Image (spheres, grey):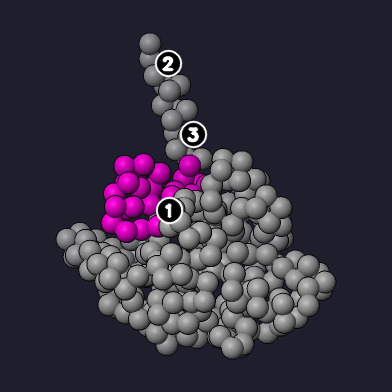
Amino acid sequence: MGENALSGTGPAWTSGSRRPVIGTWLKLDTFETVEIAAAAGLDFVIIDLEHSLISTSTLSAMLSIAGALDLKALVRIPDHASSVAKVALDNGAAGIVVPNVESVQEAESVVARVKFPPLGSRGLSTSARAGRWGLTEQSAYMAAQNSSSTLLMQIESPRAVHEAVRIAAVPGVDGLLVGPADLSAAVGSTAADGTASLLAALEKSCAEGGVFLGTAASADPEQARRLLNRGYRLLAMSSDAVLLRGAAAGLRAGWKQLLAT
């Protein structure tokens, strides 16, 4: 496990108490969602650059606000080779979520890009937000980034499930984030039993290996309870767009009911 993962307790900011943490995905191109998430008391947000059109300027504002409000903001990068990862970390991201990691070699390649020596070979600049605009001494900045920035690998395929514990053991990796929808799509939409058995095998092997597990989930608290009982400690529940859609649909349904009475 990575240097900031304490034998199954995951990223340093999840604390040694092993208290589960909840957050949500941010997909809308507006920084106000970060303020709302912080005001609501969420532990973290994941800013999604894989499936959204969030601009660079909005990302910068989101990370600035998250830092000011002490909200952990992770950034899901679009792909393994993306240069967005180091830019996001330089500008205040609490960590990086990497999509569709299937092997130890892929995990090692990502670590090389986002961690400083001796863990990786990330290029150095202290002149952005995380380096206090050049005020942080270089060696202190490198050490702080290596020890405190979170790196989560997404498990989204049968191959990744079989390699999960080995992926999590790569130095610099703090834990795994399971993508149940992508895993289901990879297995086949009619193979629900196959997906369930893969998830059960993954959860068992990760529990035995002391691997920190997170996953995407709906806003249903009963589903959250079940996931916690299965060993997950980080729940990325719903998203800004889905929560807004649900509230709008509820408003419309209430209005239709009112007109019908």
Q: Which residue is mark 1?
A: 20
Q: How crowded is the residue under tag 3: few (<14 C-alpha within 10 Å), some, or many (20+)?
A: few
Q: Which residue is mark 2?
A: 258
Q: Is residue 97 magenta?
A: no
Q: What residue is rendered at 39% in x and 19% in y? A: 257
In this image, 4 relative to 185: left or right? right
Nearer the observer, 183 or 42 = 42
Separation of marks 1 and 2 at Cα, in angstroms = 40 Å
Q: What residue is rendered at 38% in x and 11% in y? A: 261
User: Tag 3: residue type?
Assistant: Ala
Q: Which residues are magenta?
A: 217-243
Mark 1 vs 3: CB contact within 8 A: no
Of the image marks 1 and 3, the number of the one nearer the N terminus: 1
Separation of marks 2 and 3 at Cα, in angstroms = 15 Å
Q: How crowded is the residue under tag 2: few (<14 C-alpha within 10 Å), some, or many (20+)?
A: few
Q: What residue is rendered at 35% in x and 81% in y? A: 166
Nearer the observer, 130 or 103 = 130
Nearer the observer, 208 or 252 = 208
